Image (cartoon, helix red, strand yellow):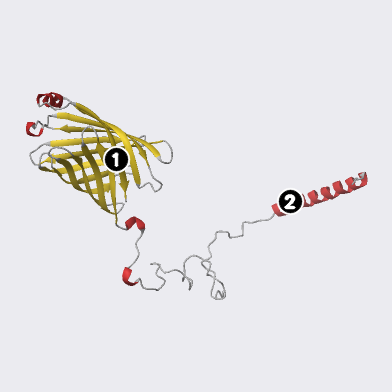
Amino acid sequence: MKISKKNLSFIGLSSLVLLTSSFATAADMSGMDHSGMDMSGDMSDMDHSGMDMSGMDMSGMQGGQPPADARSPDYSNGVSYGQYGKPMMMGSMPLWGVSVDDLGYQFDEDQINFESTGWYGTDSNRIRLRTEGSAQTKDDKEIDSLSSLAYWKPLSIFWNGEAGVAYDTENDNAAVMAGIVGTAPYFIETDARAYLYTDGQLRLDLGAEYEWRLDQHWVVIPEVGLTAFSKDDHDNGITKGFNEMETEVRLTYETFSRQLAPYVGVSYETALGKARGQRRQENESVDSNSLTAGVKFWF
C-alpha cells in the first residue's frame, strides 16, 4: 500500500499535537505545591474498626490453619504404625554387610590367602570385624591371621577412622589397634593401621590399591603393602624397621551383578632391611613370586 504525501502530513501533524499536549501537562504539574502532603507512612491514627475482612480468603497466605487434607508431621495421616513401629530414614537405619576382598590361591607358595570384612551399623557409626592372613595347604597346614574388632566412624568426605582391639595368631599376642582408611588423590584406596601389642611391640601396616577399569566388567587392580615393626623379635622372625613388601596385580572380571568377581594375577613378596639377612641365616627365601587365582565378592 502506498502512502501519499497528504497522509504523511496528517500523521506528522497528529504527532506534533500529542507531543505539545504532553509538555503542557508536565508544565501544569510542575507548579503544584506538595509541601502540605504527608507521605511519612504513619497510619497509626487511622481507624480500622469499620473495615470488614471476614469475607477475605486468606488460605493462600503463609501461616494460619493448615488445610483439612494436609499431611501430618509424622507422615502417619492418623493411621497407627502397627507391629512394625515408626519407619526410619535410610541414612539412620542400621544395616549390615560382608565383603571378601581376597580369597585366592598362591600356586608357588601352596597357600590360600584371605581378607574379609563384616560390619553392622549406620553411615555414621559402625562395628567392623576384619580378618586377613594365609593358610598353608601342605606340611603342618598352619594358619596365620590378624583379626580385629573395631569401631568405625567417618572423619571427612574421603577418610574414615577405626579404633579397637586385635589378635595376631602368628605371634600369639593381642593388641590395641587404630587406623585410617580412605581414598587418596587420583582415587587410590589407602589404609594405614597401627597395632600396639601387649609386649610393647608396635606394628604398622600400610597399603594402597588402584582400580584401572578397562570396560564395564574387566578391571586391572595393582596393590602394594608394607609392614614395619618398632623393635626386634627374633623368636617370631621380626626385625626393627620395615620387614616386608607385598605386591600383586590382578585381572578381575566383574559379573553383571558386580557382587562376584573372579580374578587371576601375579604376586611378589620381598624382605626388607635387616629382615633379609635374618631370613638368609634361617635358610628362608628372601624373595618369592607366584601366580594367583581367586575370587572377591560382597553381599
Identify the residue under disc 1. Answer: 294
Q: Residues within 10 Å of mark 1 (few under 14, many from 20)?
A: some
Q: Which residue is more in the foreground, 232 or 182?
A: 232
> Number of labelled discs?
2
Between disc 2 and disc 1, the foreground one is 1
Q: Secondary structure at mark 2?
A: helix
Q: Is residue 32 left or right of residue 285?
A: right
Cα distance between the residues tagged 2 and 1? 96 Å
Question: Which picture quadrant has residue 284?
Answer: top left
Which residue sits at x=29%, y=47%?
99
Q: The disc labelled 2 sits on which kind of residue?
A: Ala
Question: Which picture quadrant has residue 107?
Answer: top left
Give the x, y percent position of residue 153: 26, 48
Up/down of 71 relative to 289, above or below: below
Up/down of 173 relative to 70, above or below: above
Q: Secondary structure at mark 1?
A: strand
Identify the residue under disc 2. Answer: 27
Give the x, y percent position of residue 169: 13, 42
Q: Is residue 245 left or right of residue 201?
A: right
Which residue sits at x=38%, y=46%?
258
Q: Residues within 10 Å of mark 2 (few under 14, many from 20)?
A: few
Q: Is residue 134 left or right of residue 199?
A: right
Q: Is residue 167 left or right of residue 53?
A: left
Give the x, y percent position of residue 226: 22, 32
Q: Which residue is more in the foreground, 6 or 158?
A: 158
Q: Which residue is more in the foreground, 9 or 109?
A: 109
Give the x, y percent position of residue 125: 27, 52
Which residue sits at x=79%, y=49%?
19
Q: Which residue is more in the foreground, 40 or 120?
A: 120
Q: The disc labelled 1 sits on which kind of residue?
A: Gly
Mark 2 vs 1: CB contact within 8 A: no
